[in-house]
Image (cartoon, helix red, strand yellow):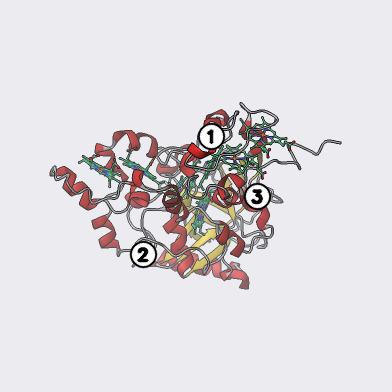
Amino acid sequence: MKNSSGTITQFAVGLLTLVTAGLFVLAGCSRSSEKVAKPALPQPSTQTASAIYTGSAVCGECHTAESATHSVSHHAKTLQVMDRKSLGELAPPEGAIPGTNYALSTQKGRFRVALANAPERGDTLDLVFGSGKTGMTFVAILGRDSLAELRMSYFPKDHKWYVTPGQEHLTDMKLGKIHKGEFPRRCVFCHAVAVPDNALVSEKKLLGVGCESCHGAGSEHVKAMRTDKTGDLHLERLTRLSPPEKNKLCTRCHTTGQNVSELEMNAAADATRRFPLFGLQKSRCFTANQENLSCLNCHTPHSNANPDPKSYEAACLKCHTSPAPNAATQAFTVGKPCPVNAKTGCINCHMPLGKILPGSKIPTQTRDHFIRVHRDTTHPAKP
Ligand code: HEC
Ligand code: HEC
Ligand code: HEC
Ligand code: HEC
Ligand code: HEC
Ligand code: HEC
Ligand code: HEC
């Protein structure tokens, strides 16, 4: 990205001297380099990436409705340049990072992390992973296939720092962890439109989950639409995909059960909140309806998840109606009506809020996509 090779080396050296032999144990969302699904889309060089991907702003010139919600979504903001201008009020405070030996400072709007007692030992941070809805993880790009991930992540809503998941075993002395090889490229691949061949990230316009992360490269489409050659869209109409095909789009990035069971999660069974797709895959609603239930039954691809639990009840009641719909006339397997409340309140009882990472200090709560009767918490067994 921006760094002169001098500062890259300085940061690399700074970290290398601080971090132990556990350095190359990989972390982040998915903790293994080998086991994340291989990227499904081609990974062009920087030049080709710019040529075939337009970035979401261009799409927005014509598709104003999709763009209005997408451009401000957590998808769009999940990877940003680490500077004051991009972060705005989500920016972390300058000064000592609690519980560590290092401090954050800014210079001309860019952030720098360094040892508090040796300010020359450190470097500029380049990128922010995470929209700020929950945790934001700051990284420095070290080269075309390596990045340094800070040991502490910032949670702007709480104005607090917590240990980055996967780095719990590093002591307070460590600045963070260096990821090398295929894995850092996967991090970017899941948080951006494309990963170029000869660099870890390309231009700003391709950071974040953009229109083309799901719809594919759009230059040809734009060219054709601008010259009114609408006969061939040069894009697939995703509305025509079957529910499993739609899920597959999301699976490019949202971790599947297979990924999770392969991860070194200390309690993989607890990961149903961390990884929604993994949770949903365990639900009987899904296992009985693999051909007909997709993420899009409950979510729209162009906006954030609706925080109102009531807004999801219609989706539940499509299957769990009382009296039960005529199974023979339904394209999907219908479920039974609820014996406790057949009309409302479904989400709070069957997708209750809970800590995203059980056993961690991170207080973030999310809904459990493993839809079931929660005898343990919301519905303790009757005496
Ligand atoms: C110059 C205007 C223009 C630009 C820029 C543009 N589109 Fe389109 N797009 C159109 C038109 C016109 C159609 C055809 C609508 C139709 O026939 O249904 C279309 C159709 C589509 C469809 C199919 C819609 C459907 O009904 O299934 C998708 C998806 C799409 N565009 C995505 C994109 C993406 C992604 C970008 C950015 C890479 C983009 N468009 C940029 C004009 C544009
Ligand atoms: C397999 C794709 C994938 C990879 C690889 C990946 N992420 Fe993510 N990341 C996601 C998805 C999807 C989410 C949203 C939560 C979810 O559904 O799992 C997310 C969420 C996040 C968040 C928001 C906070 C949170 O935990 O929800 C941060 C920060 C983050 N990732 C950082 C990273 C970093 C840093 C790396 C590499 C070291 C990385 N991710 C690698 C897909 C990925
Ligand atoms: C997370 C994946 C994802 C992203 C990001 C995304 N789309 Fe879509 N888009 C879809 C899916 C899936 C559908 C089909 C929705 C359906 O069948 O209900 C779709 C449908 C559409 C349609 C057809 C609309 C309709 O309802 O007929 C257009 C046009 C479109 N998208 C444009 C865009 C543009 C422009 C952007 C960026 C501003 C964008 N999309 C971002 C996944 C995505
Ligand atoms: C290119 C990778 C990628 C693809 C493809 C993708 N997602 Fe995501 N998604 C992410 C990441 C990363 C986040 C975390 C955003 C953040 O930092 O808060 C996320 C967050 C979300 C959220 C939470 C939004 C919120 O309100 O916070 C929903 C819902 C979601 N994705 C649904 C989908 C669906 C449905 C699809 C398929 C149509 C899909 N995603 C495809 C990467 C992806
Ligand atoms: C039966 C309904 C349903 C289905 C199907 C569903 N979700 Fe959700 N999802 C929800 C609800 C309810 C929430 C909570 C929204 C909130 O409180 O903000 C949610 C929230 C999310 C979030 C945000 C988590 C957070 O709190 O930060 C992500 C990411 C997500 N869903 C991804 C997915 C993906 C990927 C799929 C497909 C595998 C999917 N969901 C399928 C109901 C559903
Ligand atoms: C596409 C249809 C479909 C949708 C949508 C759906 N379900 Fe289901 N669900 C089923 C089927 C089929 C079963 C298995 C038969 C049964 O127990 O009724 C099931 C089972 C269940 C069970 C019993 C689980 C168990 O392990 O015994 C609960 C609770 C449940 N669903 C709640 C919900 C809630 C709440 C929603 C909305 C957030 C929802 N379902 C959405 C079809 C669906
Ligand atoms: C106050 C909490 C509560 C609310 C609200 C609620 N449920 Fe339930 N639900 C339960 C409990 C408890 C059970 C288990 C009942 C039993 O086994 O005696 C259950 C059972 C179920 C079952 C399994 C039925 C069977 O016979 O296997 C389904 C399906 C279900 N609920 C769906 C829903 C849907 C859909 C909604 C919203 C319209 C909903 N529930 C609202 C608490 C609730």
Q: Is residue 170 left or right of residue 258?
A: right
- Between the C-alphas of marks 1 and 3, the distance is 40 Å
The residue closer to the viewer here, 355 or 336, is 336
Q: Position of residue 170 (x, y in %)?
A: 65, 63
Could one spot residue 85 in this view of the protein? Answer: yes
Q: Which residue is mark 2?
A: 199
Q: Is the C terminus in the top left, top right, bottom left or bottom right quadrant?
A: top right
Q: Which mark is residue 326?
A: 1
Q: Nearer the viewer, mark 2 or mark 1?
A: 1
Disc 3 versus disc 2: distance between alpha carbons? 32 Å
Badge 2 crowding class, 10 Å Cα cut-off, few under 14, some 14 to 19, many 20 or more, is some
Alpha carbons under labels 2 and 1: distance apart: 56 Å
Q: In the rendered view, would you say 85 is above or below 1? A: above
Tell me the quarter of the picture where residue 29 sits.
bottom right
Q: Determine the secondary structure under disc 1.
A: loop
Q: Quadrant of residue 39?
A: bottom left
State which quadrant residue 225 falls in: top left
Q: Give the residue furthest to the front.
A: 328
Badge 3 is on which residue? 357
Assign a secondary structure to mark 2.
loop
> Is any atom of residue 1 visible in this view?
no
Query: Front-most of 4 and 271?
Result: 271
Q: Percent from the top left, x then y, of residue 240?
A: 34, 45
Q: Of circles 1 and 3, which is in front?
A: 1
Q: Amino acid at mark 1?
A: Asn
Q: Is mark 1 within 8 Å of ligand 6?
A: no
In primary-sequence order, the first of circles 1 and 3 is 1
